Image (cartoon, coloured by chain):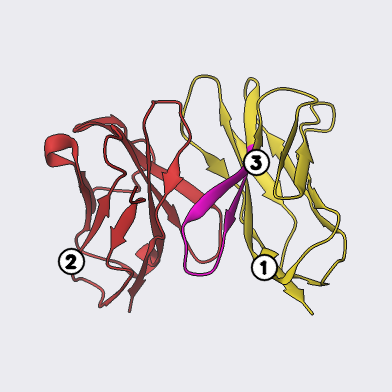
Chain colours: A red, B yellow
Amino acid sequence: EAGVTQFPSHSVIEKGQTVTLRCDPISGHDNLYWYRRVMGKEIKFLLHFVKESKQDESGMPNNRFLAERTGGTYSTLKVQPAELEDSGVYFCASSQETRGEQYFGPGTRLTVT
Amino acid sequence: GNSVTQMEGPVTLSEEAFLTINCTYTATGYPSLFWYVQYPGEGLQLLLKATKADDKGSNKGFEATYRKETTSFHLEKGSVQVSDSAVYFCALVTGGGNKLTFGTGTQLKVEL
């Protein structure tokens, strides 16, 4: 069974540009989460989807971030326009049950210059 | 709110040395506690967990005991191997939630 996959693995963009990160959860997992680790600090929760619905988006830092999960399968996280402080590693996780074990992807390292 | 504090890294040990990575927490309610590990180039993997006070989680020779009185969940291993080199994250979740709160991570490097 394939694990959680994320694309791209690395992205380097200039301030003001747009970047879209993609996450493919484990097949059959209704729950999908986005987390972010900035500059070696703690990993912070961004949001949680149940199927295509946003269950909790309390961790989204501001309106420059837009997450979607059309059709309840893969998810995208768009940052527009990117700022320097958005640099970090963005992790995606999925789980079968709402309170079940979360399986993480390898992360996307975003560098904004 | 919830928070997790881990010891600063990096931690460098010789193979077969004893490992302790400290983790303390503050939480509303009664949290479940976790240790995740991230090997180079891979995603976070759940290493072990404990869901109530005095529970001991264990896996791959690693252990951690849920200490409510000291609000701690220290990770230990009696004899580390080079293959244990990774970043270790302590985390918690409270109540019926699923929003993980992580510590800053501790990088472990094990040398021959």
Q: Quadrant of residue B10?
A: bottom right
CA gap between label 2 and label 3 equals 38 Å
Q: Are marks 1 and 2 on the same chain?
A: no
User: What residue is disc 3 on?
Assistant: B48
Check residue B36 for magenta coloring.
Answer: yes
Disc 3 on helix, strand or loop? strand
Magenta span of residues: B34-48
Check residue B28 for magenta coloring.
Answer: no
User: What residue type is disc 1 on?
Assistant: Ser
Q: Chain of mark 1?
A: B
Q: Is residue A33 left or right of residue B18?
A: left
Q: Is residue B61 left or right of residue A68?
A: right
* Nearer to us in this view, A16 or B38: B38
Of discs 2 and 3, which sits in the foreground? Answer: 3
User: What residue is disc 2 on?
Assistant: A18
Q: Are marks 2 and 3 on the same chain?
A: no
User: What residue is disc 1 on?
Assistant: B83
Q: In the image, is residue A43 above or below residue B48?
A: below
Q: Quadrant of residue B11?
A: bottom right
The quarter of the rendered structure image containing the C terminus of chain B is bottom right
**Percent of width and height locating residue B19:** 83, 58
Magenta segment, prevailing SS (helix, strand or loop)? strand
The residue under the point 45% across, 39% down is A102
The residue under the point 71% across, 52% down is B6
Specify few, some or many for label 3: CA neighbours under 10 Å numbering under 14, 14-19, or 20 or more: many
User: What residue type is disc 2 on?
Assistant: Thr
